[in-house]
Amino acid sequence: MPSSTPRSTPRANRSSRIAGFHKKSPRERLDLVAAFAGLSDSEVAHLSDFGNLAPDLADRLIENVIGTMNVPVGIATNMRIDGEDVLIPMATEESSVVAAVCNAARQVYEDGFTTSVSGNLMIAQVQAVGVSDPHAARLRILAQREALRTLCDACDPVLVSLGGGLRDVEVRVLDSLGGAMVVTHLIVDTRDAMGANAVNTMAEAVAPHIAGWSGGRVYLRILSNLADRRLARAQAVWRTDAIGGPEVRDGIVSAYHFAEADPYRAATHNKGIMNGIDAVVLATGNDTRAIEAGAHAYAARSGRYTSLTRYEVTASGDLSASIELPLAVGLVGGATKLHPTAQACLKILGATTAERLARIIAAVGLAQNFSALKALATTGIQKGHMALHAQNIAMMAGAVGEEIEAVARVLVEGHRVRLDVAQDVLAGIRRG
């Protein structure tokens, strides 16, 4: 068994300046880090286990790799989306997230979720500053639409052959702290790719030309993660008698009204939505940070931060719910194409286009939000969450095997899901 004795280096001799660190192998880097941080043999052995991701692949996905961080992948059941039953892989470390989607979907299974998308359009921005006549410059750039199309499409002939490429050009004059800016938007159909690399390449290619047409200096030339031309939408109707009656329905609507009116509530409301969305985005190897940024920016598009979902009562008295948000996800490029777990998760989903993947993710976000609001409107969020979290607390206390369930049961029944209580319960179980 590996030793737990730390490998120590005197603090005074530690330096984070390690020459050629990026050129070393993952194991060589790990040994250097272990000496720096005083890692034990058992900690080094743990980090050396890359799980189901080959070390050489991990070393190419990001820089300075020393190990991997394994996140559980669970399956949400009961999901019927646009008439098709789907199993949803979700990668998350948080208790109750997967269960929440399962429960929400079960209560609307017969009718399921209906989804749509606005398309696959991404925006690249090219910023010109120091323009003496910004409004006239805007018109000069717009007059070069076809030249811009030629320049952009030449950057990615494969994308064009698949039906993608530049679709439109917008030019905005922005007042800023540094004066007027002329900002050109390249609207690009990226098809089944998320599209960051494609649109960034196009923005850089046209930048010198925009500088010439505007008479200014071009600085930033990069995509926007506020992908409001790439919206995904989902809706569902939960029958009032299936969710606990009018009082529960009205409590859910009231919770939505709170989130719609108050950014303090909306932040947590939308965080719950992203619990589900991020879990599918991560499981499929897509960019969780880009999706988060776009969603929260979209939630503030009116000038104040508000809910990403809406809840209403239908004419027949049932609960109608909908969600709309940017979902720039892809099936090709980066980890989505290279990570074997992401590939397996996409196969489980059966998503063969980026649009279908976005539709599924939107439905998951709506299901997640419904479960959270229903819990808040009835028993409170902690009852279900803490029942699942109790097992984590039991393991933190040192419980193993059947002890985990036994300790968790006592914690939940006593309404005290705390580490100190779990330690006392475990000690009692072991004393017999």
Image (cartoon, rainbow, N blue to C red):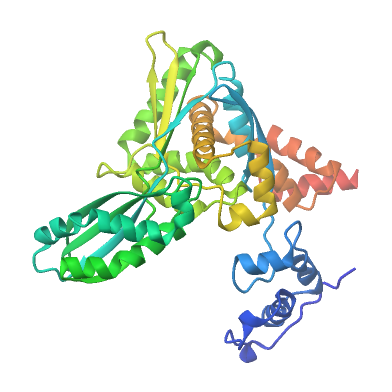
Q: Quadrant location of the C terminus?
A: top right
Give percent across and percent down for residue 186.
31, 54
Between 360 and 152, the residue placed more toward the observer is 152
For the view shown, which residue lies furthest in the top direction? 316
Q: Is residue 66 above or below residue 267?
A: below
In which image quadrant can residue 254 be found? Answer: top left
Residue sitting at 17 percent across and 66 percent down? 214
- Relative to 400, is 89 above or below? above
Which of the 4 image quadrants contains residue 242? top right
The image quadrant where one finds the N terminus is bottom right
Is 351 on the left-hand or right-hand side of 47? left
Q: Residue at x 66, y 55 (%)?
A: 339
Q: Residue 175, image x and y in percent?
A: 15, 59
Residue occupying the point 68% across, 81% down:
24
On the question of residue 421 being in view, the answer is: no
Along the viewing direction, whichever of 189 and 258 lies nearer the viewer: 189
Using residue 360 as the reference point, say whether residue 257 is left or right of it.
left
Residue 133 sits in which quadrant?
A: bottom left
* Rendered location of residue 36, percent (x, y): 67, 82
Which residue occupies the foreground of this view, 47 or 336? 336
At 31% from the left and 44% from the top, the residue drawn is 300
Q: Position of residue 266 (x, y in %)?
A: 38, 40
Q: Is residue 21 above or below residue 242?
A: below
Q: Residue furthest bottom?
A: 13
Count of numbered tags:
0
Answer yes or no: is residue 144 visible: yes
